[in-house]
Amino acid sequence: MAEEQGQERSEQATAKRREDFRKKGQVAQSREVNTALLLSASILLWFIYAEGFWHQLAWLVCHFFELAGTFDLTNENTVEMLLFIALRCGLLLFPLLLMVLVVGFFASFIQIGWLLTGKPLLPDFSKLDPIKGAARFVSKRSLVELLKSLIKVVLVGAVAYQTVFNAFDGALRLVDMEVLATLQYVGQVSLSVLLKSCGVMLLLALVDFLFVRWEMEEKMKMTKQEQKEEFKESEGDPHIKAKVRSLQQQMARRRMMAEVPKADVVITNPTHLSIALRYEEKKMDAPMVVAKGADELALRIREIAREHRVPLVENVAVARALYQVEVGHVVPEQMFQAVAEILAYVYSLKRRPAGPR
């Protein structure tokens, strides 16, 4: 809707939008990183595993030919032989398969962290639309992928060609060498091509990873209208929240005003502030602020106090200090002496004989 209205996606993605993208499986993951790491791990594994691999493969071939002359061709023996060969080949290839599994998981983990979602596997019938499918073939995304593939092929091909071209002079001397020396030379050149190609792939993977991250950031950007709508969904309508806060404040004020008649004294400043205190010796450790207010609210507190014959005491310094205390909290220790004197004065007034007011 925002795009239809022509709004520009200029705002950075919020945490909620990023989380929504992750839940859908839309994350910045580069396939080039997986390919480069897999190639690097394969070369490293070959350095470690090559000797054992050739030893086991040679033993398997020799064992097969040793049994060939005495092999009794029956259904049971054939099945047993095939199972034996499949098991030995499986053991030979197991390190490679394990490496692919571990490197594949590690390559994804370092890019996107831990993410387990099944939404990308859900069928999307919109992809069956032939018109949209054809549009994807000529989309900006497909052109970018084509350009990246061409760059990869050109760079890797150039590195391989340059390596082989530099080794051409050495290849001319292979005519006078033994077969083993020839194989060793070819192996060295092949290894050099692989290592240099691996270096190019790692560099391309880094560039592609940064590009994919940037591309995903651009995709997740929001319009100002989308940010407002998301804020309303997550935080609620600001107008409704303001109204709820107003109702809560009104209810809290009514409860506070209901406590004024129970107060022992109301300390004033003399007209701007009013603080109502109550003290029950058997239940409280110190006097408690049961109501407070400024200006109009202070005037209302004094009116209620007069209606219920609660004493009013004017003390500017004490009133200002007690106004900082939250309703329902006891007065601070440094105010004990001043408040105690005021309460003592109020109690002395209550003990006097009642006279005309």
Image (cartoon, rainbow, N blue to C red):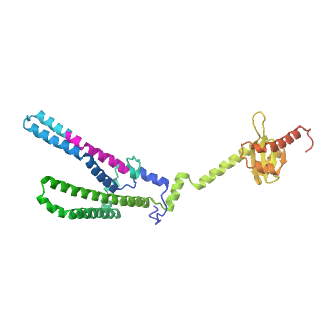
| In the image: residue 220, left or right of residue 298 | left
The quadrant in which residue 189 appears is bottom left
- Say how many tags the image has: 0
| Nearest to the observer: residue 209 or residue 246 | 209
Which image quarter holds the N terminus?
A: bottom left
Give left or right: position of 340 versus 146.
Answer: right
**x and y, in percent, of residue 64 in the image:** 12, 39
Does residue 122 appear anywhere in the picture? no
Q: Quadrant of residue 192?
A: bottom left
Observer able to see residue 344: yes
Prevalent SS, magenta region: helix
Q: Residue at x 39, y 51 (%)?
A: 110
Q: Which residues are magenta?
A: 88-108
Left or right: residue 340 compared with residue 88: right
Residue 96 part of the magenta-drawn span: yes
Which residue appears farthest toward the bottom when viewing the image? Answer: 6
Q: Is residue 321 above or below residue 281?
A: below
Q: Position of residue 55 (x, y in %)?
A: 19, 43
* Residue drawn at point x = 27 percent, y = 44 percent: 95
